[in-house]
Image (cartoon, rainbow, N blue to C red):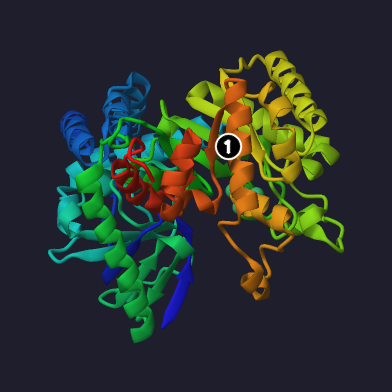
Amino acid sequence: MQVATGKSVLNGIAIGKIKVYTPPKVTISEDLIEDIETELKRFDAAREKAITQQNALYEKAVIDAGEDSAEVFSVHAMMLEDDDLIDATKEIIKNQKHNAEYATKIAFNNQAKVFAEMDDPYMKERSADIYDIEQAVLNVLFGIDPESMQGKEPAILVANDLTPSETVRLDKSLLLGIITRQGSLNSHTAILARSMGIPALVQCGEVQSKWDGKTAIIDGYNSCVYIDPTEDLMASLKAKQDNEKKQKALLQELKGQSNTTIDGKTIKVYANIGGPSDIGLVQQNDAGGVGLFRSEFVYLNAKDYPSEDEQFNAYRLAVEALAPKQVIIRTCDIGADKQVGYMGMHKEDNPAMGCRAIRLCLTRRDFFKTQLRALLRAASYGNLGIMFPMIISTRELHECKELLAECTKELNARGITVGNYSIGVMIETPAAVMIADELAEECDFFSIGTNDLTQYTLAIDRQNASLDPFLDTHHPAVLREIQMTIDAGHRHGTWVGICGELGADLSLTETFLRMGVDELSVNPVSVLPLRKTIRGINLKKEK
Ligand code: PEP
Ligand code: MG
C-alpha cells in the first residue's frame, strides 16, 4: 500500500480505480506561414466556438454546482471577447507570420503572466482563467474533444492539473474523485469540485502515472490517498463511505426543512468547521450557518505566521461562499493541546490553564491584530460573526472590542471600509457563566463551549482518557451552567448557542430546547440527525 498526501478540498471518501488523465500530446509548429488570411479566419472561428462552449459549460455548471460556481464560465466567455487579447494574437499572425495555434499560445501566455505577477491575490488567480481559455481555443484548433479523455468506467481521476472547463466537462456519473499534483484550495477547480460534492485532493506531489488502473481510496478527512489499500483499511473506509451515503439519504428526506418541534418552536442548527475545505460539507448537510469556525487551523496548517492576506482569503472564502448564512469565526485558540512550532511558545507546567486563546492574543497584540484586520476585511463579503474564546472577564472583552476599533481605523486609513459584523463570546469557563449578565450586555451572542466548560467545571483534563471513570458528560453542574447562561443571555437580548460536543448529543436535545437554547452548532454530519430529532420533539407534552 502507498499513502500520498495533499490538500483536501472536501471531507469525503472516494473508492475506485484510478484513471490517469493525460491530455493528448500536440506539437505547435513554429514554421512561418504564407496564407495569413486563412490563419486569421481559423483563429476567429476557434475563438467563436470556444465562446459557445464556455456558455454551454456555464449552463452545465449551474445545474451541477450552482450559479455562483458557474460564474467563472461567463467570465471566460467575456475574456474571449477581449479586444487586447484578440489584437495581440492577430498581430502575431499578421506581423510574425505564425499560425493560429502558435499565436494563441504566445499571446495568451503573455497575458496570463501579466496576471500572475500582480500583487492582488484575486487578479493572480485570473492567470489560471487565461490558461483555461487558451486551452479551449487550442483544443478547437487541434480538433481535440476533451470529453473523450475521461474514459468510460467510473474512476478517480488523477491529473497534473485540471482547468475549471475540464472539471465541469467531466461526466459526474463516472467521476468518483479527483487528485491533482497542482492546484490550490481556492482555485475554481477546487470550488467546483466542492460544490459538486466530489472528494478531491490538490497539491498531491506524489502523483504518478503508474497509478493508472490501481485501486485507491481518497480519504478527504485526512487529506490523503491510499493506493492498493489493505483489506482492513478498505473495510473501515467503506463503512465510513456507507455512512456518508446514509447521510445523503437523510438529506433527501430533510433538506430544506426547518428545525421546528411538533409544537412549533424553531431553533438554528449550525455547523462547526475547521477551515474553508469544510464549506462543501456545510452546504451538503444543509446547515443554517457556521456556529464555530475554529480559525486556529489556519495557523496549525501553516509553516510560518499566516499573513493578513492569507487569513483574509481563508475567511472571505467561507463568508462569501455561504452568504447570506451567518459564519461565526472564532479568533485564534492556540495553546493547551494546540501547539504551533513557529510561535515559539514557552513550555508551561499546566498549559490547559496557561497562556492559551484570548490570553495569548492579548499578550501578542500585533499577532492578534493581524487576524482581526483579516476578519474585518472579510466582513463585507457576507454575514460574519467574530467570537472570542476563553473569556473570563469583561475587561478582556473590552480590550478585544478596543482592538477591533483600532484595526477598523487602520483599515479605513488604507481605504478599506469594514462591513457589518456581530460580536460573540464563548462561554467555556465557570467564570464566564458567573458574569454572563455583564458579558451579555456587551455582545450579540454567546456560544457555550461545553468541552472546556466541562473540563474547567469538573476539574477533569479533557485530554486525559484515564479519568473517564470520573467523567459525567451530563453532570448537573454543567447543565445548570448552561441554563444560567441561556437565562442571562435572554435577560439582555443576547442569543445563546452551544458549540461544544454536547450540542450534538441527541439524548440532550429536548433538555436544551426546554432550557430555551437558540442555536446548536455541531459537526456538519450531525446537522441532519439533529434536525430529525428536533422535528420529533413536542415541548407541550409533559416529560
Ligand atoms: C469547547 O470548548 O467546547 C469548544 C467548542 O472549543 P474547543 O473544543 O475548540 O476548545
Ligand atoms: Mg474550547
The residue shown at (31%, 30%) is: 264
**In front of the other: 117 or 37:** 117
x and y, in percent, of residue 48 in the image: 17, 29
Compared with 377, 171 (above or below) is below
| Amino acid identity at mark 1 | Ile
Compared with 230, 290 (above or below) is above
The residue shown at (37%, 66%) is: 218
Left or right, residue 121 beside residue 241: right
**In front of the other: 220 or 494:** 494
x and y, in percent, of residue 372 in the image: 69, 31
Quadrant of residue 416 in the image?
A: top right
Quadrant of residue 107 in the image?
A: top left
Q: Which residue is mark 1?
A: 329
Mark 1 lies within 8 Å of ligand 1 (Cβ measured)? no
The residue shown at (44%, 39%) is: 513
x and y, in percent, of residue 315 in the image: 55, 36
